[in-house]
Image (cartoon, rainbow, N blue to C red):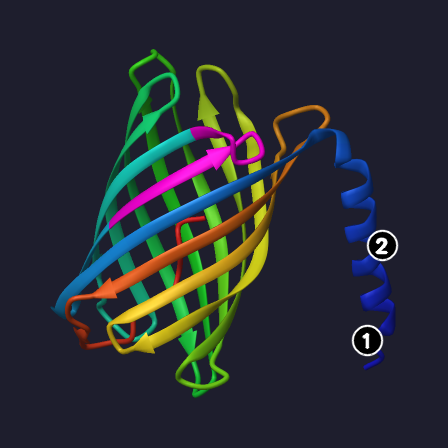
Amino acid sequence: MNKKPYLYIVTIIICYTVTNAQDTWDNQLYTGTRIAWGKGEWKQTGEFQVRLLDDVSALDRWYLEYALTYLPSEHWELTPDIRYSIKSSSQEIRPGLGGIYKVLTSKFQFANQVKWQGDYNTDGTFGHGVRWAMFLNYMINETFIPNFVGGVFYRWGNEFTGWEFLRFGAGVNIRFDPLHILNLSYFLGALTGEVPWQWSGIFYAQLTIRITDDWKYIPANIINF
């Protein structure tokens, strides 16, 4: 199959996006630390994350999140979670429930995630929505694992209903040892509910510390982006 036409199309889309986003562009930074532990069919994680926006000059939010993952088979995961966020103008409680289907080979891991979340803010706004995301990881070796991710989010709320945002990007997992993994990624994001779309470039850095990794099945390698 001749891949050149597809490369041309992708190049044109990227150039058009960057050119038309210059007046609505924001550079952002997400940093986080995740602790993971568990055994057998159960995995638990706790995460602290900070997000900066307005060209990395203002705090968007910081949050704490706990997630419990049930791994009934090598292909499926079920994950309820709860997140508490401190935002610039309010606080937010966000329960969630997600399902993941994953496929693994000797070199690749593909994970498809669908997740419901509810957003309850102290400023009186509320809503709920569904996000869909895909994650692809390729193992060059045990130290460097490039990854690709893309996802969209649809919201129902008292202030906005519709497709709220999309994000896609790429990065690399650096595995220092079996218990310490650093993810460095860069995403393009768009608030699709805005006219014109509000675009952002997001640099993402997350350190995962595994207290234990004695799981019956290999967990999906995903991030909160």
Quadrant of the rendering where the N terminus is positioned? bottom right
Q: Horizontal placement of 116 versus 203: left or right?
A: left
Instruction: State the image quarter where residue 117 is shown.
Output: top left
Q: Quadrant of residue 63?
A: top left
Identify the amino acid type marked 2. Ile
Residue topped by disc 2: 12
Q: Which residues are magenta?
A: 47-59
Against 91, residue 223 (above or below) is below
Residue 176 shown left or right of residue 196 in the figure: left
Which residue is tagged 1?
A: 3
SS at circle 1? loop
Tell me where residue 195 appears, x and y as whole percent: 70, 24
Element at label 2: helix
**Closer to viewer: mark 2 or mark 1:** 2
Whether residue 197 appears in magenta in the rendering, the answer is: no
What residue appears at the point 61 percent right and 27 percent down from the top-left corner? 193
Residue 127 appears in the figure: yes
